Image: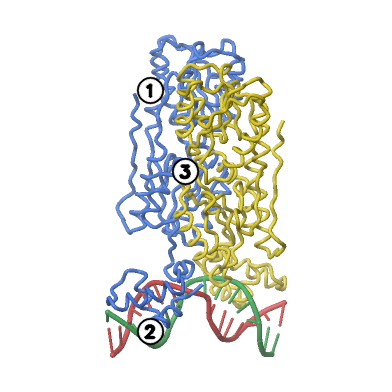
Chain colours: A yellow, B blue, C green, D red
Amino acid sequence: MATIYQVATLAGVSPATVSRVFNGHTVSKDKIQLVRAAAKKLQFEPNRTARTLRRQRSDHMALVIPDIENPFFTSLARGVEDVAQSAGYSVVLCNTDEDYEKELRYFDIVMSENMAGVILASAGDRSDLSGLISRGRPIVAVDRGPHGFNIDSVMVDNRAGGIAATRDLIDKGFKRIACITGPSDVETAQQRTDGWQAAMKLLKDNKQPATYLRHANNRVDGGREAMSALLSLNPPPDAVFITNNLMCIGALQVLSERNISPSSMGIAVFGDLPFSISSAMLNKVIPLDARQLGATAARLLLERINGDEQPARTVVLRNEIG
Amino acid sequence: MATIYQVATLAGVSPATVSRVFNGHTVSKDKIQLVRAAAKKLQFEPNRTARTLRRQRSDHMALVIPDIENPFFTSLARGVEDVAQSAGYSVVLCNTDEDYEKELRYFDIVMSENMAGVILASAGDRSDLSGLISRGRPIVAVDRGPHGFNIDSVMVDNRAGGIAATRDLIDKGFKRIACITGPSDVETAQQRTDGWQAAMKLLKDNKQPATYLRHANNRVDGGREAMSALLSLNPPPDAVFITNNLMCIGALQVLSERNISPSSMGIAVFGDLPFSISSAMLNKVIPLDARQLGATAARLLLERINGDEQPARTVVLRNEIG
DNA sequence: CTGAAAGCGCTAACAC
DNA sequence: GTGTTAGCGCTTTCAG
């Protein structure tokens, strides 16, 4: 690959001038022409590694997510990507499997590669951001909050969604409303569960035993297990609020396998189901615009990268609860 | 962030020795101790940008895929990631939206960042790999073949799968079997369609008008449109072979909306449906182990990165057709 | 086994 | 507006 020196020689200018041309600094028209011609001839492409080393900042942003196979996060990634790309940044996707160690390893990479910033959908509420923060690397938390760190974040109103979903089931006459939620160290799970609990207080004769609250991993198999467990209770619930998309898939699979008709079990879910064929089985879906979430986070991050120093902001996206 | 010079000073050795310690070269036990202690004290983390610049090779591999929102490709990404990570490589995910220009732009980035290699699920059969190849960058094609370029590839037997799926429908007594396939410049679509055509020749009184073959984009909306179009034919098909997962979702949505029962329309699909609740509507699914595909591709790429110079290989994964 | 020193390709003072 | 030059932090000859 050609270097700026070769281009400079061919164009009869200094390397600095070549650099200036490629960075949009002021250079006389005629030299711009010469440089462009020479660059084209040599198929010159600026070496980003060298640029990054010199500038101490790359044009990558890291997107750290807990589960790349959850369509919610891939949509979010799309949103980030769209914004990043149009600002000239590449997105490095880092999948943590909800593992704090893996997350930390990625943070190290962010530092040692001088990435411009991080968008973090954290593994849980025990993420250690201190290293990144002490080194002044911009971070935006998305979906899950900043829990204790003083950083920008973009979220939805999880509690309100939990309330709305549960209320819908109550309004439809269900009495024994269970809740399948995520791990207890995941903030979104907590908040949505809070919403469910708050709404349940409205029920006059609240027949809600503690066993109606099930924690599970946020994936399909977690939903399956939780729903199976609920069905074996006596009495089983007559409805269930499920706090994430994949667990709802799992729960519906179990119902389908046991030929339990949709009408005999009310279902409300937080977040749209991916690739569903029919929503006939669902009483209520709290919509969740992952792409918007990602795009907003990316925009905040770009502002920080460009030197914005204002105090940390929390943006709450309204999830138009019907 | 600390540098090797600071570590060297603190440890009382030369920078070269620090470098050697961190690269596993031969250094005396006692100096190793000194260096490790100093590094720990300073929280030293080697600067990968500098290393990449010097070595002319980074520890990133690019994974170029056409649609990050298709679970097939995210599973594939998981497979790549697992293998890459355990070999110390990071995966940079590049989403092309099936756009050749975006693809080329990513290839430029691969070069200008000195990435170690590329795994490519190409946008179509007109991808231009000449730049990468002339510069000696290792590439492995996955899912879609190398079409003309002399590179390693990992694929499944698409034609055989197409035949098996179609045969299953024939055996079950369907007569008017349509095919919903992908864009005509996508190799997997072509080959699966070939299989369908080959199998249809077995039907004695082959009632297959040209309109039974529909090309669509490989996404949900493409499947919806194609299925709608098929249903408005006279006579409509009594079964359909769909060459990818998302289009099948779209097709099933249309059937569901029109209350067309599964039994009156045979469906076979190439590739498992993501997050499906019940497979009752499907006659035949040709399994497709995306994760395996990705892992295999990553292994081949690692071999090339490590200097393997043997002639290009094509690995065909058997997709255990029932 | 270890140190000195060159240089990967670029950018940003600094001088003119 | 343009050229000269000093590094960014690391690896890797080359000597010893």
* Of pointers 1 and 2, the one earlier in the residue sequence: 2
Q: Are the residues at dot 3 and dot 2 in contact (C-beta closer than 8 Å)?
A: no
Asked if badges 1 and 2 are on one and the same chain, I answer yes
Of the numbered discs in the image, which one, if any, rests on residue A108? none
Tell me which chain the residue with mark 2 is part of.
B
Q: To which quarter of the image does residue B216 belong?
A: top right
Measured in 3D between alpha carbons, the distance from the residue under mark 1 to the one under mark 2, in whole angstroms, is 69 Å
Mark 1 vs mark 2: give the one in front. Answer: 2
Q: Is residue B189 in view?
A: yes
Give the camera-side residue of A179 and A64. Answer: A179
Say which amino acid is labelled 3.
Ala
Say which amino acid is labelled 2.
Gly
> Which residue has dot 1 on it?
B164
Give the camera-side residue of A75 and C15. Answer: A75
> Which residue has dot 3 on it?
B121
Asked if badges 3 and 2 are on one and the same chain, I answer yes
In terms of secondary structure, where does tag 3 sit?
loop
* Of pointers 3 and 2, the one earlier in the residue sequence: 2
Of the numbered discs in the image, which one, if any, rests on residue B12? 2
Measured in 3D between alpha carbons, the distance from the residue under mark 3 to the one under mark 1, in whole angstroms, is 24 Å
Q: Are the residues at dot 3 and dot 1 in contact (C-beta closer than 8 Å)?
A: no
